[in-house]
Image (tube, helix red, strand yellow):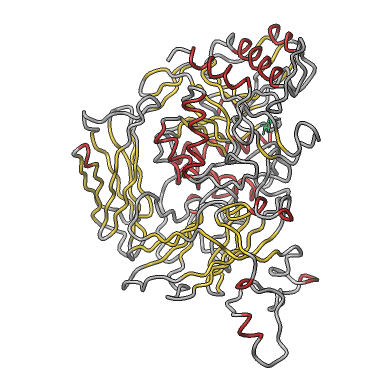
Amino acid sequence: MKHLLPALSLAVAFMMSFAARAAEPVGMDMQAGPPAPVAHAADALRPPLLLTGQRADVQDLSGRWTYSKDYYRTGLTDINGWVAKSRMQRHRDVDVAAEESKPGTGFFEFDLDRGPAMQIPGAWNAAEPELRWYDGLIWFQRRFDVAAPRAGERSFLRFEAVNYRAHVYLNGKEVGRHEGGFTPFVLEVTDALRANGNRLVVGVDSRHDAQSIPGEITDWDLYGGITRPVTLIRTPATFIDDATLRLTDAGRLVGSLQLNGAQAANAPVSVQIAALGLKAQATTDARGEARFDIPAPATLKRWSPESPQLYAVRFAAGSDAVTDRMGFRTLAVKGADILLNGQPITLRGVSLHEEELGANPARRLNEPAARALLTEVKQGLHGNYVRLSHYPHSETLLRAADELGLLVWSEIPVYWTVDWDNPAVLLKARRMQAETIYRDRNRAALALWSVGNETPVADNRTRFHAALAATVRALDPGRLVSAALLVEREGDTIRIADPLLPHLDVMAVNTYAGWYGDDRLDDLARLRWALPTDKPLIVSEFGADALAGHHDLGEPPRKWSEEFQAAYYRATLQMLERIPNLRGLSPWVLKDFRSPRREHPVFQNGWNRKGLISETGQRKLAFQLLADHYRGLPR
Ligand code: GCB
């Protein structure tokens, strides 16, 4: 990563507080060999980004990639911790068949050129039955040619997501590593690339452990593999690494543009929105960053779910230009209200996992797949909101939410329990948070950053989340911070008293009374909610399992039936209506999803059945009930 200019994006106080605790990036080095020197901790959170949007020179590396399973991880390390044997090193730039035809004693125990192939992007779990529950290491290879580079040009590989660890080699050379299964990373390969027959090898390790995020146990399928697109991007020697623009309450368009390269300092740059007749110039500072602060034109139409207006925004600098489709709106909390463009809004939503419709999902959320899910929310449920749980979803889905008009809650997978006391784990979480903020902060749809889900209250956990909330505020002051909290139960009282509340703009809780626990549905009417009322509350989860097509006409209906699920929704919605500061709902969950925790042989078979639709899209009774509820709410 040559010429990578650091950007000063975090508040100074925040940098100071972390510089002492976590001066070195741990476990997430983006380069081979020793980690690059880190000027200060804030810079360590800022990877090269390569702002997405329309760019001139992007080569899609999707398609058939060959692979080699590595159950005993011999491609990384030999027995006894010895260096891996060269005959096992899948990353080598070697034509195995050609070598085998030569005389001599050498031999190989892999050959990626002749290996089986699978469609990338896509999780391996869906590719062959043997890999359905495989958790470990697989090596992938893609061969490709490139057009001859122009003088001074630079080349980058951009991975949108590799779950969970990636070891990346180009033509035998290690070009980088990454940890974290849901965020993009960019590696410079200018010097490693050749014109013909490039050999890109990625070791993908899906194993989670006590220090990973999430940890080892989740209520969803972890889906190993290269789950989102991989592209090769060519840029001029100095290029636009990042650019952003947002509307402030004062009616101004405020933003910045970050150049990366030898000519990044003191360079003229511009932003243009042709449809509004707007063009502004600025000059970068010594660090390559330029700032914009322009009055918003009177003709600007604000983005909202009802009118998801997007504009082509063109950022230009020297010979580089990127056009992003962006919407502009304001967002705030006032008392117990969430204000969108100054008006109170109620979030009518549902939670979503990143899993496409179909009997054998591969976490392949391409545009049609993303639209199919979001259309169920927007049109089917009359929704204006989705909770993307429990990790950052694909950029494609975020862009579809922008287009369709659905506000978004985005979360990093600090789920149940992670290693709260380990500064390296906190740094990982902050990096994940930063990577997703940098990726998505130009999406008008994105409203709330959640710093975790259902983590058990304890001092070390609260400190961890508070640090994440501070990261969010420093990097993206224009959005709201929340977390899906656990509730406390005392007799008939459900209490929200989490010490994290002061760090959040919006309270959110998951509640399952009537499904988990001993309450009968009739009992829900008796439950009282004790909670602070000076902030908006979102009920981020409630739900009950039902197998689509399984009916019980008894009174009351038994669990697992569509009738029970519908009755549960009716009782829960009635209970929640009594909460004065309730401003949003995202019941659990839109679609049945794969979960290794769910093994009832009649009703589950590896699926969490709390979907309002089945895995293949069949609507259950509760779907219409929620749709009617949302349609009846005041707009
Ligand atoms: C929860 C979790 C979610 C689970 C859900 C369930 O509270 O946040 O990840 O899938 O409950 O179905 O139990």
Residue occupying image coordinates x 39% and y 36%: 403
The residue most toward the left is 277
Q: Is residue 68 above or below residue 104?
A: above
Q: Is residue 459 left or right of residue 580?
A: right
Q: Nearer the viewer, residue 124 or 75?
A: 124
Counting the numbered discs, the total is 0
Percent x, y of residue 505: 51, 26
Q: Is residue 178 above or below residue 379?
A: below
Residue occupying image coordinates x 72% and y 75%: 109
The residue most toward the top is 526
Percent x, y of residue 173: 55, 73
Q: Nearer the viewer, residue 103 or 344?
A: 103
Quadrant of picture, ligand 1: top right
Q: Is residue 379 above or below residue 268?
A: above
Q: Is residue 82 left or right of residue 180?
A: right
Q: Is residue 92 left or right of residue 315?
A: right
Q: Is residue 141 above or below residue 627?
A: below
Residue occupying image coordinates x 53% and y 51%: 228
Percent x, y of residue 358: 61, 41
Q: Quadrant of residue 543?
A: top right
Q: Is residue 52 left or right of residue 612?
A: left
Percent x, y of residue 517: 78, 20
Q: Quadrant of residue 419?
A: top right
Quadrant where the C terminus sits is: top left
Q: Nearer the viewer, residue 567 or 547?
A: 547
